[in-house]
Amino acid sequence: MYNKKVDEIKELISEKEVIKIIKELVEIPSYPGIQSQETKVAEKIKHIFESENIKVEVQEVVDGRCNVIARIKGNGIGKNLLLTGHTDTVPPYDMENACKLIEKDNKLYGRGTVDMKGPLACMIASMIAIKRSKVELKGDLIFAGVIDEEEGSEGTIDLLKRNLDIDAAIVGEPTRLEICVAHRGLEWIEFDFVGKTVHGGKQEEGINAIVKATNFIQRIEDEVIPKIYSNTHPIIGTSSMNYGTINGGTQPSTVAGNCKLKIDRRWVPKENYQDMLKEYQDILDDMSKKDDKFKCEMKIMKESVMRDGYVHEAMETDTNSDIVKISKGITDKIMDKDTKLTYFPAWTDGGLLSSYANIETIVFAPGDLESAHSSKEFIDKKQVYPATVIYTLIAMEYCS
């Protein structure tokens, strides 16, 4: 049965067409510093959909930067599925010919090929295949190319505020065609320790901020770290914390009057965000109470702040949900193997969809996250067309 369906999809859209879409998207730069950043990509996607008579609109989110939303309407009696991914990329950095698609050894190189214009192209192609098939869906199939995932997720936040009536979502971050049903939440926290600067020869008159910071770190090691690694999840494993940077003082002969500690804190589903922050603040309060020379301010790093109080929440979807069961059943058949249900190691916009809108969400796409943001970013060409077929079959079954 599936062989017949795959043959039908091949008649509707070819691998060559999918790769052409990837090429067109990669050739349009959409990294920070570009005017209106993602909007030209959104307009290109709009043009592609309009040429197939698929209803589509470009929606401004902030500062001329636009999401692009397409919809194939169902007859209103089924469930609605969202195919989504971000249109922004990181800068080229030291990548040569970053905005040119280069094919070599069954790999497609270029900035955004895997993160994530390649997966977006597969989703666009699946929408085109379904439109060309003239199949009647019961639920709506929606595509959203959203802005700003690499920074503040303005695009997905805007999507949530529009109440699109979505039952399930597939986020197209690269998973090597494994099905990710969960990921950790994420926060970056900064601790600013304030001491008193004096000459090193009179250090008894100063307050060494580095010493205060190391005392705080020891309290974290004794009290917080054991709690973090006792928070477990059957698929993800444990919560985590990383000391990212520590900087303090000016020179060896001067008592350090300041010290900054920055950490990366990730938590598993069910762990409460405010309780997580409170663990650190409680230690700071206790240290201040016991030592009148201890001064430290805790704050969320500006790079991590989202608007309107949104945070980088964890994602979790029941493995018995329809979107997981349908996706696994189809992927097993197309790839001829037992597809792994796993977790995504990084954060995605799926955390917003899952936590704030109760949308059953999976992360699933071709390509390997390992090459994202690198000077050798690529997507595995051998996974591109199977992903397109899988998206198409999932949509047909879920929205039927």
Image: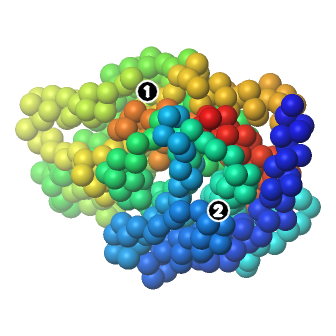
Residue at screen point 37% across, 38% down: 357
What residue is shown at x 34% (from left), y 52% (from top)?
Answer: 162
Quadrant of res 113: bottom right
Tell me the SS state at disc 2. helix
Q: Is residue 223 above or below residue 170?
A: above
Q: Which percent across, then down, holds residue 18?
A: 77, 62
Q: Amino acid at mark 2?
A: Lys
- Where does residue 62 sit, x and y in percent of width and height? 34, 69
44 sits left or right of 209 in the view: right
For label 1, the SS is loop
Quadrant assignment, res 358: top left
Would residue 373 be visible to someone looking at this image?
no
Foreground: 300 or 168? Answer: 168
Near-viewer residue (88 or 41): 41
How many C-alpha atoms fall within 10 Å of the one at disc 1: few (<14), some, or many (≥20)? many
The residue shown at (57%, 38%) is: 138
Residue at (86, 55) in percent of width and height = 11
Residue 88: give x, y in percent of width and height: 53, 65
Q: List the residue tagged with mark 2.
A: 117
Q: Relative to 129, does residue 292 appear above or below in the rendering?
A: above
Q: Is residue 180 left or right of residue 144?
A: right
Of mark 1 and mark 2, the one earlier in the sequence is 2
x, y percent for residue 105: 92, 61
Q: Which residue is mark 1?
A: 269
Residue 235, quarter of picture: top right
